[in-house]
Image (spheres, helix red, strand yellow):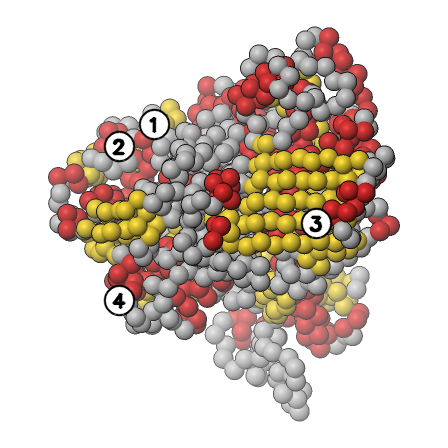
Amino acid sequence: MSQVDAPVPVSFTVNGAPYSLDLPARRLLSDALRHDLRLTGTHVGCEHGVCGACTVLVDGAPMRSCLLFAVSLDGAAITTTEGCRDPDGGMGPVQQAFHECHALQCGFCTPGFVTTVTAYLRDHPDPTAEDAREAISGNLCRCTGYVNIVAAVQRAAELLAPQDQP
Amino acid sequence: MTTKLFGERVPRVEDARLVTGAGRFLDDLGHDALEVAFVRSPHAHARIVDIDVSGALDVEGLVAIYTYEDLAEDTTTRVAERLPLLIPHPALTHGRTQHALAEDEVNHVGEAIAMVVASSRYVAEDVADRIRVDYELLPAVVGVEAARRADLLVHEDVPGNVAAVMVQQAGGDAEAAIDAAPHSLELDLAIERSASMPLEGKGVLARWDPDDRSMLVHTSTQTSTSVRQAIAAKLALPVDRVEVVTPDVGGGFGVKIVHPWPEEVLVPWAAKRLGQPVKWTEDRREHFVSSAHERGQLHHVRVGYDDAGRLRGLSVEFWHDHGAYIPYGLIVPIITSTQLLGPYKPGAYRVEFRSLYTNTVIVTPYRGAGRPQGCFVMERVMDAIAADLGLDRTVVRERNFIQPGEMPFDQGLVFQDGRPLIYDSGDFPASLAKLKELVGWDDFPALRERAAAEGRRLGIGLACYVEGTGVGPYEGGHIRVETDGSVVVSTGLTSQGQGHQTMLAQIVADELGVPFEAITVTTGDTRRFKYAVGTFASRTAVMSGSAVAMTARKVRDKALRIAAQALEAAVEDLEIVDGHVQVKGSPTGSIDIGAVAVLSNPLRYAFDGAAARATQFAAPADPSRPPIGPGEEPGLEGTDYYSPPRSTFANGMHAVVVETDPDTAEVKILRYCVVHDCGTLINPMIVEGQVHGGVAQGIAGAMYETLAYDEHGQLLNASFMDFLMPYVTELPAKLELGHQQTPSPLNPLGIKGAGEAGVIPVSAVIASAVEDALGFRISAMPISPSILFDLRRDFAAGGIEATAKGRTRA
């Protein structure tokens, strides 16, 4: 074992499940999620932090998993698009909104949008269209021209809004 | 009655997997495979003097290093040969392609020299870093102007850097017609390079089974069937020992149609040699410097016209930069040559192009494929004529339109499919009227004045295009009804996010009469369907859509024949509704289509409950007739193919209102309107999504994206930090769409392609509007604020002429 790949212990949760891993210090969080934990919903589009496809939530905050070393996440709670599902495994509200609004085509960038929008709507539950554009302004999509993604952000806000009690 | 799904906004069946993280893209597979990294040339043009791997051999986890020598030593295969020239053409007299690993010379930065296989990508890159390559540097040829100057050559044996000279003409002597016309003008027009740039790069995973002597390859491609043939040919394997599967693909836009990419040969070759699964996943920098680009062309135009602005003659000469090699032949410049004509009658037309080598990444079709350049040229000509004659730009276009009554219209040229350029349908005057209404063309002067009163500078532009879609030779479909009533559909071409599973299921549901939910569609898997061409040229809906419709009709007829016996009714009295065969209008006494599938396959053995109903002592049968009648086959299934005589021609028109910032020269899009005619719509939601994405890529190419090579052939912006792919903030918040539907007479469903359309006229329409706002000619795209700032200053200083007589300088 070369020194660069000497294992370092790290513990974190992903989508609520605890993991204790021994990983090379240079292993990216994106690779650890995808190839060690086989959570392949997180995608890697540029590996230099620009496209946002690899965005995951670290203790609730959107972060680029391609720019983080996995071993630096000791004690963190990580959420991926798999963790944005409904408890029954179906589409969660943000995912449902993307489906309803045709806000994805190839779907490669979508997991990064889902996590980003999930975090945004937690803090901004009632975004205007302009707010919605701001919310997704750090993620690249090559297929949709973003028109339907903006609509999906607003639709997701509707789906997440507390229902009026009769 | 079953609800008709053709034409409905059916939500996509693909989505649930993709949004929840259950998609399966190339790098989501083969977690235990060995991984590959490449040593790629850092020089644009060099001879390889020596490759020294000695410093890399002690890296733990290294499995193998391969160079061209290893390929050449393997005489049992053909991996050392140059990659194929996929589309030969008589005019392509000097076609050159690359080796999978460079032999002794590299011709662009990024060309692969050595392949490293290791336990992980991390280790493979460690090894690649330690391999030393000595080069003898050669001067690089970069850009069209350097290539045509030809004082330096890319390939020593290609004089003038010219791979091909091609001329097409129609309608008489163009030069004479121009000379004889009352008016004429000349334009020089340029479009820079851009690239498909899907969010997922390429990738290949190969698994060799030494016991079965078979190869299973997953690759992020736009053509699995042809990759299969290519791998079999290169590895000298029988074709039936190779299968190629396209997993979920994270966007293609053209760059994944070329094949085999070097990696599609090398990864399977290494997997077979090593007896272990091997995977390569392209990273972003590799994609920039070793996957294909497009668009770079210079054009010189002469046009002659009468007092009304009608074209008498048009002569276009252009120079196409195809990069270091030319595996995809002349498709892009042929498309520019022919599709340049758009919806117009050009009078006498002559076009001549030269396809030139440069020491840059290869050029192959990118969404639009030569049409954005052609459209830019023709629409600049229309605007220039309007300015010269002081006519409204829509009037000049109207006067040159092919009229609906003239369809089918033969332009007298040969299109990219080798077939005549005959427009089959379209109503250009109606489309233009719709666009003018949508954008408020006639009200714009008042709007411009009001804005000017506030110190704001507005411009309006329009551009029209015609797009040959659904090129042949063919696609096919296979449909099988299972005994539980589920319906499995497959077609050979691949998907990269266009919603093919949804759209094809809509067609099958209607044609076969089964519930949409019962249908599963597979694309791009050679284990399921062996014969296909691929996904390019906006052809899936036309080709596979027609093929599965024809197949569904065949299977429906078979179901009716079998059910007619069971129901003791005449075939013509039966129908299939919601998965049940019944006497027309009479749901009682129906038989479900799964039961028909059981009856279609007479059995000896009852392996399950459904099968028991078809065994020899269970089913009533005429003992005098064979269980499978003459001409019939077991199973409720069928295959059919659609092969059109020629392409079908979609069309459209865009209009845009822009505002230019008086200080920064930034161009802001205020309105963006599209009228689009792709014949009948299968799923308007999906079509609109295609238009959205196409326009976004068009705006990217018109205002942001270039591939900035320096004079040494170094790509200066090979990252997403420097290549300005638009975020949402760079694109208009709203696109206003109008559909014009003139069905194609060439296929059973009246479909014309929709995939590429959105991108085609965008550079033309933005140029038209910016020119209108500022009053001087725009002749090169993309246009950035800094370029526009300089042009505006030159114009103010009298350095460039005004486009229209009487326009004042800013």
User: Callout 4: 10 Å neighbours few (<14), some, many (20+)?
Assistant: few
Q: CA distance from mark 1 to mark 3?
A: 62 Å
Give me the disc on residue B350. Answer: 3
Amino acid on which the number 2 mark rests in the picture: Phe
- Badges 1 and 3, same chain: no
Q: Residue at x 44, y 25 (%)?
A: A119
- Asked whether disc 1 touches disc 3, contact meaning CB atoms under 8 Å apart, the reply is no
Q: Is residue B78 visible?
A: yes
Report in which chain the residue with disc 2 lies: A
Residue on which disc 4 sits: B73
Q: CA distance from mark 1 to mark 2?
A: 12 Å
Question: Which of the two marks, 2 or 3, is nearer to us in this view?
Answer: 3
Residue on which disc 2 sits: A69
Q: Position of residue B173 (x, y in %)?
A: 76, 51
User: Callout 2: 10 Å neighbours few (<14), some, many (20+)?
Assistant: some
Q: Position of residue B556 (x, y in %)?
A: 69, 67
Q: CA distance from mark 4 to mark 1?
A: 51 Å
Q: Earlier in the sequence, mark 1 or mark 2?
A: 1
Amino acid on which the number 4 mark rests in the picture: Glu
Classify B281 as above or below A138: below
Among the 4 quarters of the image, the one containing residue A146: top right
Residue on which disc 1 sits: A58
Q: Is residue B1 visible?
A: no
Q: Under tag 2, what secondary structure?
A: loop
Q: Under tag 4, what secondary structure?
A: helix
Give me the disc on residue B604. Answer: none
Amino acid on which the number 3 mark rests in the picture: Arg
